[in-house]
Image (cartoon, rainbow, N blue to C red):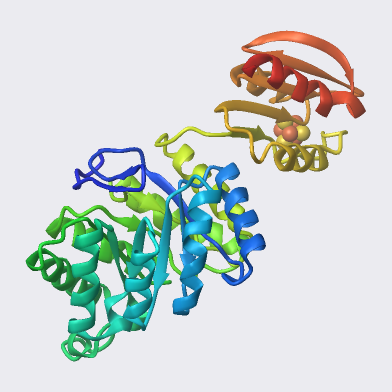
Amino acid sequence: MERRITRKIVIGNVAVGGGSPIVVQSMLKTDPYNIKETIDQAKELKRAGCELIRIALPQEDTCKIIPILRKEVDVPIIGDIHFNHKIALKAMDMGIDAIRINPGTINNLRKVREVVNLAKETSTPIRIGINIGSLEKKILKRYIKPNADAMVESAIYYTKYFEDLGWQEIKVSLKASDILQTVEAYRKFSEKSDYPLHVGITEAGPVFSGVIKSAIGIGILLYDGIGDTLRVSLTGNPVLEVLAAYHILRGLNLRKRGINIISCPTCGRCTTKLVDIVNAFEKEMDYFTDSINVAIMGCEVNGPGEAKEADIGIAFGAGKAVLFSKGRVVKTGIPKELALDVLKEEIHNLTS
Ligand code: SF4
């Protein structure tokens, strides 16, 4: 796996592209007029490891939350703006760290130019967010229906337009809810351009299916070396988006954060409520930041082997469990009801 070399831009204090670690972002889902809830959610996202937080700014007066958020939460804030370019101007006046615009929904070159000119003046990076559902009419005229080539044409057109105006602190996204169309668009664009790319499958759906779609689409792109920042878009709690993003990155050895749980699917040999134990463990360790492998196994068939290979492992048997740490047995005869506590204590010992 070789990462494609892109230009580097900096959003707040976070580098994107140019070989920097792939940045995890998510988006606030609260009402931007509800300052308390929005700040609380932003803090939750930070705690989960979110490195760039995007906020929808549907009206100009929602921009008043920008300085408050920047003061309360130490994560760069990206304003997400559609239709009304004046909101982008206002957001930059209010000190936003970066903006995301979709030129297709602004749909007016003079207005886009105004945004770019102020971005230059205020040194605000811009994401050009191309979406298959909102391509400009002039581009669509050349295609029978919206497709990857139309998205690429639109992205190339606007990156060139921004460059001609003298602004290159840009990153690009080309999103469709269809995985293969998205992959095609990113692949084609990255053959033609070295701007950093924000990757994701848009409108991926509810948590279960959305994570699967995202893992396939984002996984293919990352494996191709494409992607400098990513978001897993889910109809659900945004903290799950961040956790899912790290699972994808960890699965490809691109970032390390949190616990990699190795657990067996259970079968008729399992005499423990392993599903409950693993679910409880995963939930409790959601915010754990150290990168370790933990095996939780249902019986003596594969249990001791997997538990030995992990940093810490617990293997259940008839009635009792055995705890391993770094390949060695550290405790035997653990009653099942104490197993979770013993496991957490050992993790604490190993990582503190
Ligand atoms: S480790 Fe044991 S309980 Fe788990 S799936 Fe394998 S055989 Fe079944």
Q: Quadrant of residue 18?
A: top left
Q: In the rendered image, which quarter contains the C terminus?
A: top right
Identify whether 49 is placed above or below 132.
above
Q: In screen coordinates, is 174 left or right of 311?
A: left
Considering depth in this image, is 158 or 294 the residue closer to the camera?
158
Q: Position of residue 61 (x, y in %)?
A: 49, 76
Identify whether 223 is placed above or below 138.
above
Considering depth in this image, is 35 or 277 the residue closer to the camera?
35
Using the rendered image of the protein, determine whether residue 180 is visible from the camera's viewpoint.
Answer: no
Q: Position of residue 172 (x, y in %)?
A: 27, 62
Q: In screen coordinates, is 67 left or right of 110?
A: right
Q: Residue at x 65, y 15 (%)?
A: 350
Considering depth in this image, is 204 or 319 the residue closer to the camera?
204
Q: Residue at x 66, y 20 (%)?
A: 312
Q: Position of residue 190 (x, y in %)?
A: 20, 56
Q: Quadrant of residue 189?
A: bottom left
Identify whether 42 is placed above or below 318.
below
Quadrant observed for ligand 1 in the rendered image: top right
